Image (spheres, rainbow, N blue to C red):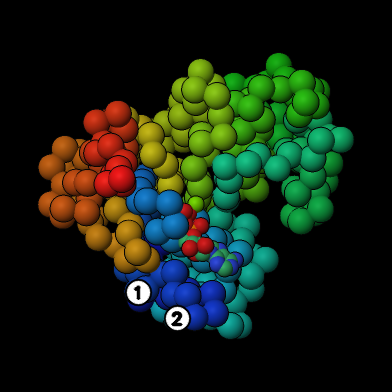
Amino acid sequence: MRAIEIEGLRKAFGDDEVLRGIDLAVEAGEVVCVIGPSGSGKSTLLRCVNLLEVPTGGTIRVDGDEITDPDADLDALRRRIGMVFQQFNLFPHLTALENVMVAQVKVLRRPRAEAERIARENLDRVGLADRADAFPTRLSGGQQQRVAIARALAMGPSVMLFDEPTSALDPELVGDVLGVMRGLAEDGMTMLVVTHEMSFAREVADRVVFLDGGVVVEDGPAARVIAEPEKPRTREFLARVLDPAAAAPPKRGKE
Ligand SMILES: Nc1ncnc2c1ncn2[C@@H]1O[C@H](COP(=O)(O)OP(=O)(O)O)[C@@H](O)[C@H]1O
Ligand SMILES: [Mg+2]
């Protein structure tokens, strides 16, 4: 079954149409990486799938249910969709364990003992079983992001969305977070991931989608899109991402 099915998705902010008719499908268990220049609409796309933004046109289905239907039960739908942002947004006054418990108790109304058990399972899954009692300030950025992943997983989502999850991390901390994401992919989690970590995309993603100017320019098998992009815009973008030093130098004035 299609886990996510996006058809003709449009999103405008005032006169500024940021998504201009996106068609994108993610099968259950598939990992799809979305790449594209800054401002191309990647975050807006993910935020529409999670209904943090209301689309101005088109439809989105998650597990066959249309989330863009005005009568849809948004709370129930959001629970099926876990989201991890660039900024981890942990509660600073709560421990790692409590951060992973709070929405389970407040939103899902799980009994505390059950929420704690599920929180510990998910902290273990992201390699932080021994840091359950640490406050966020005592955790590295990579550890905080792994707590944020555990927090999303604890809600039992059928789909996980990641918006540049490693972009705010020091380089030496990126690998642990990507390792956790790779583990989720191996466990069969359906994932839509905005990232510029091209080795992750090459090794873990089933497909890579290149977004530019609010449209899907290219969508294909990850290895093929990365090694042999068909469209010149994809080629130019990948050349810059894969080897920033080789990019064309800035144009000089003639004075
Ligand atoms: N809430 C908003 N209000 C107005 N414009 C927005 C809003 N969110 C995003 N945009 C605009 O939409 C465009 C795409 O943004 P975004 O989806 O964040 O791109 P990306 O994640 O690819 O960098 C940008 O021009 C941005 O300024
Ligand atoms: Mg973004």
Amino acid at circle 1: Gly
| Alpha carbons under labels 2 and 1: distance apart | 8 Å
The quarter holding residue 120 reads: top right
The quarter holding residue 95 reads: top right
Out of 207 and 236, give the one closest to the viewer: 236
Out of 192 and 212, give the one closest to the viewer: 212
- Dot 1 surroundings within 10 Å: few (below 14), some, or many (20 or more)? some
Q: Residue at x 22, y 50 (%)?
A: 234
Task: Kindly tell me whether residue 117 is visible in this rendering.
Answer: no
Above or below: residue 15 compared with residue 178: below
* Residue hosting label 1: 21
Marks 2 and 1 close (CB-CB < 8 Å): yes
Lower position in the chain sequence, tag 2 or tag 1 = 1
Check disc 1 and report its element: helix, strand or loop.
strand
Above or below: residue 254 compared with residue 135: below
Amino acid at circle 2: Gly
Q: Residue at x 45, y 81 (%)?
A: 57
